Image (tube, rainbow, N blue to C red):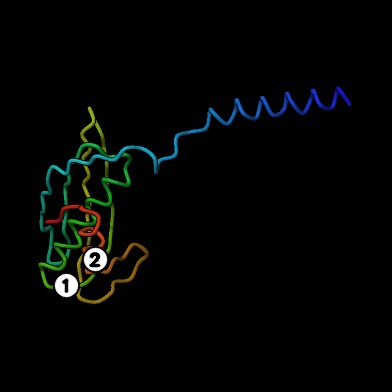
Amino acid sequence: MARAAFISSVWLLCAGAVSGCEATDPSRVAFSPDYQGVETRLLGDDLVSFKVTMTGARNREDVSRYADCAAAQYTLIRGYGFARHLRTNIDEAGGIWHGDAVYTISSALPRGLKTMDAEVVAADCAENGIPMV
């Protein structure tokens, strides 16, 4: 009996020590973004490039989301309702994040997996305080 109690105590002690070493939950990381601007370039009638710059991003997803917001608003400004994400290149140096994203814009829902309804995305961006074009 004493041995079983000892093993249980050691196991609990080890479990407690290990639980203190868990990776930081990304949702608990302080998020203080500084959106530093969007450069928009029309590459064709329906092909658009967005270059975004920001600091305070938690990860690549924050930069990608900023580009999505710019694309959504631009799509609406041009009188279209939908966009399709083609690619995003992201890099970070010295805490400054750069994203270079390309989208097609259209009046009808385009084929593909990475499509977005511009009105829905723009509303989400406004609700979350992410600036747009």
Report the residue that reaches farthest toward the bottom: 108
Q: Amino acid at mark 1?
A: Tyr
In the visual, does 120 lie left or right of 133? right
For the residue labelled by badge 1, is the local secondary structure a helix, a strand or a loop? loop
What residue sits 69% from the left and 29% below the top?
12
Seen in the picture, residue 77 relative to 8 is either above or below; the reply is below
Q: Which residue is mark 1?
A: 80
Please identify the quadrant where the N terminus is shown. Answer: top right
Q: Amino acid at mark 2?
A: Ala
Indicate the quadrant where residue 8 lies.
Answer: top right
In the visual, does 79 lie left or right of 61? left
Residues 61 and 103: in front is 61
In the visual, does 98 lie left or right of 60? left
What residue sits 25% from the left and 34% below the top?
92
Q: Are marks 2 and 1 in contact (CB under 8 Å)?
A: yes
For the residue labelled by badge 2, is the local secondary structure a helix, a strand or a loop? strand
Indicate the quadrant where residue 19 lies.
Answer: top right
Residue 85 spot, x, y in % from top left? 28, 59
Residue 87 spot, x, y in % from top left? 28, 53
Mark 2 → mark 1, Cα distance in angstroms: 8 Å
Seen in the picture, residue 110 relative to 58 is either above or below; the reply is below
